[in-house]
Image: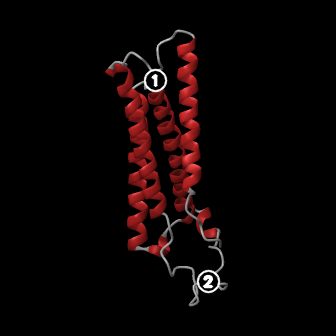
Amino acid sequence: MRKVERSNPLVTLAVAAMGAAVGLVVQFALSSRGHAPLSPPLSLPASLVLVAGVLLVFGLRLRRQIRKQPGAIDPFHAVRLLVTARAGQIVGALFGGFGAGLLLSLTGRSVAATAATWVPMMLVVIAGAVLLGCAAIVEHWCRVPPGDETDEDGGLDPERGPADPAVYRDR
């Protein structure tokens, strides 16, 4: 069994930069055609925060189960939650960067934008950061406690094989 590595923060930063670039391109394309700036709907940041909350609830449930009965954890559930947390980091970075790109395009204007224009953009940036942070916390909670699958030297125990798949067929 291979040790699961943490998400690379440079990848998250690169995704946020791509989101910001897309936000800038969208705003510049709209302004070059004489359209009003794109103002995201308020349901977008609300949805991002809702996903972050659901992710935290599932993460807390797994963390409590790890502390109570570490051997009784369904590894498939833990892996699914880990993958969801990593996807949440990417989505949070992408939307947060997109909102930042939308906001950045407003800074070069000679006429200040109204609050109805920039507040939803700021909320998207904040909601993306919330989702990114919650997903990083849940990813940390999905780590296997030390000593569960290691021998006395700290390496993986060769005597321990994978879990019997028959246990999970009946679920």
Q: Check if mark 1's residue and mark 2's residue have beta carbons within 8 Å.
A: no
Disc 2 designates what residue?
Answer: 155
Disc 1 designates what residue?
Answer: 108
- Given residues 57 and 155, the one toward you in this image is 155
Q: Few, some or many C-alpha atoms within 10 Å of disc 1 (few <14, some 14-19, many ≥20)?
A: few
Q: Which residue is drawn at 42% across and 54% down?
A: 58
The vertical placement of 130 against 170, above or below, is above
The vertical placement of 1 against 9, above or below, is below
Residue 87 appears anywhere in the view: no
Considering the image in quadrants, where does the C terminus appear? Answer: bottom right
- Give the residue type that dot 2 points to: Gly
Q: Residue furthest bottom?
A: 152
- Given residues 37 and 166, the one toward you in this image is 37
The vertical placement of 57 against 164, above or below, is above
Give the total of numbered labels. Answer: 2
Mark 2 or mark 1, which is nearer the start of the sequence?
A: 1
**Under tag 1, what secondary structure?**
loop
Residue 62 at x, y percent in the picture: 43, 62
Q: Few, some or many C-alpha atoms within 10 Å of disc 2 (few <14, some 14-19, many ≥20)?
A: few
Mark 1, mark 2: which one is toward the viewer?
1
The vertical placement of 154 against 45, above or below, is below
Residue 93 at x, y percent in the picture: 51, 43
Residue 132 at x, y percent in the picture: 46, 48
